[in-house]
Image (tube, grey):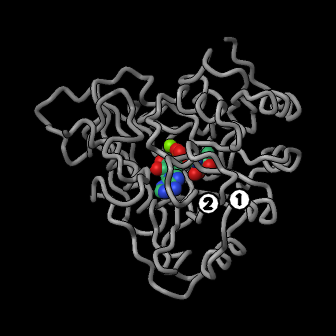
Amino acid sequence: MNTKTGTNINEAISLLRSGEIVAIPTETVYGLAGNGTDEKAIQKIFKAKKRPLSNPLILHFSNLEHLSKYVKNLPKHAKILAEHFWPGPLTLLLEKSEIIPATVNAGNRRVAVRIPNHEMTLKLLSKIDFPLAAPSANLYGRISPTTVEHVLNQLDQIIPYVLNGGECNNGIESTIVGFDENSPIIYRLGAITVEQIESCLGQKIKIHNHNIQNSGPDASGMVKFHYAPRTPMYNIEQICTKEETSKFGYIGFDTLNHLIPAENQFLLSEEGDLRIASRNLYHAMHHMDQKHFEKIFICDFPNEELGRSMNDRIKKAIAKFNA
Ligand code: TXA
Ligand code: MG
């Protein structure tokens, strides 16, 4: 199958209406979208990504009114968060209504929903009468895409169309919040920080313990290996100075590392700005992965605000090579 890229929203819509899957831009990462009410389209998404059916998808809507038809209710805290952060990089886990096929959310009681903040995709969503089920448009376990090129690197010839909406603004996935007996819990760290959520709700928020395996909902954070490049990646603390470092690459925050040649390094934000750094994180990982280094090293980020979300992704990316 030839993969076309372009900015034609109507072309994307007619493919989606005919049950096809299309990569779409969002403010976080590109999504691999299909009609969220069409069982066959949903199966195509899982197949194209090689994703296990046990890992549920997020439904995307253009407005709260449309979204409300697909969930049983909107708890008090959910309503506050929705009004504050949507459209934006927040995903809520809510009780699903019967119209959603069970394959979307792996038979869970709850479904993940969000209103993304990307002009092109909001326009597309406003022209269709079904939600778009869309996981990140990468192969299972690999790095999420923040540009059309990243999508093509993994899904070229596998999907018919990539809607080109430029580079994703946030560059890291949405933050997932669920509710346990009405108390909010963060299931996945992401583009909206814990601090922002706490300040919006005026209370401390629990973060779900991602290390608990086989219990509770299957959130992405619980998969041990994720977001990984093909080149082995390690924390910079693990570098051994006795090794030949000229074939090593380094992804740093704002400062070059003196052990590795400067031309092998990618600084995420020379000005030390976490927002810029998190926008560039996946791009840097994709870029360095193409350089044929023997190993890629990466630094830790300050464990606050977006640094915390970045550390979460980095931890999962390097887990594969430290197993
Ligand atoms: O920013 C984002 O959220 C992007 C863009 C495309 O919207 N999407 C995204 O989807 O990151 P995905 O599928 O790569 O990650 C969503 C994660 C899944 O790994 C899944 O485990 C979790 O959300 N999730 C979805 N539905 C869930 C549910 N009902 N209960 C628990 N976790 C759920
Ligand atoms: Mg993903």
Q: CA distance from mark 2 to mark 1?
A: 6 Å
Res 129 label:
none
Q: Residue at x 73, y 56 (%)?
A: 117
Q: In front: 150, or 76?
A: 76
> Can the viewer see residue 254?
no
* Crowd band around label 1 with a 10 angstrom C-alpha radius: few (<14), some (14–19), many (20+): many
Residue 178: percent from left, percent from top: 51, 68
Q: In front: 302, or 101?
A: 101
Q: In front: 115, or 250?
A: 115
> Can the viewer see residue 257?
yes
Residue 288: percent from left, percent from top: 43, 30
Q: Residue at x 47, y 33 (%)?
A: 51
Outermost residue on the bottom side: it is 202
Disc 2 residue type (three-letter): Lys
Residue 137: percent from left, percent from top: 58, 35
Dot 2 or dot 1: first in sequence order is 1
Disc 2 marks which residue? 96
Relative placement, left or right, of 312 versus 56 is: left
Q: Is residue 121 above or below residue 248?
A: below
Q: Is residue 27 above or below residue 15?
A: below
Res 70 label:
1
Circle 1 — which element?
loop
Relative placement, left or right, of 37 versus 65 is: left
Label 2 C-beta lies within 8 Å of the nearest ligand 1 atom: yes
The reply to whether discs 2 and 1 touch (Cβ–Cβ < 8 Å) is: yes
Q: Is residue 254 above or below residue 38?
A: below
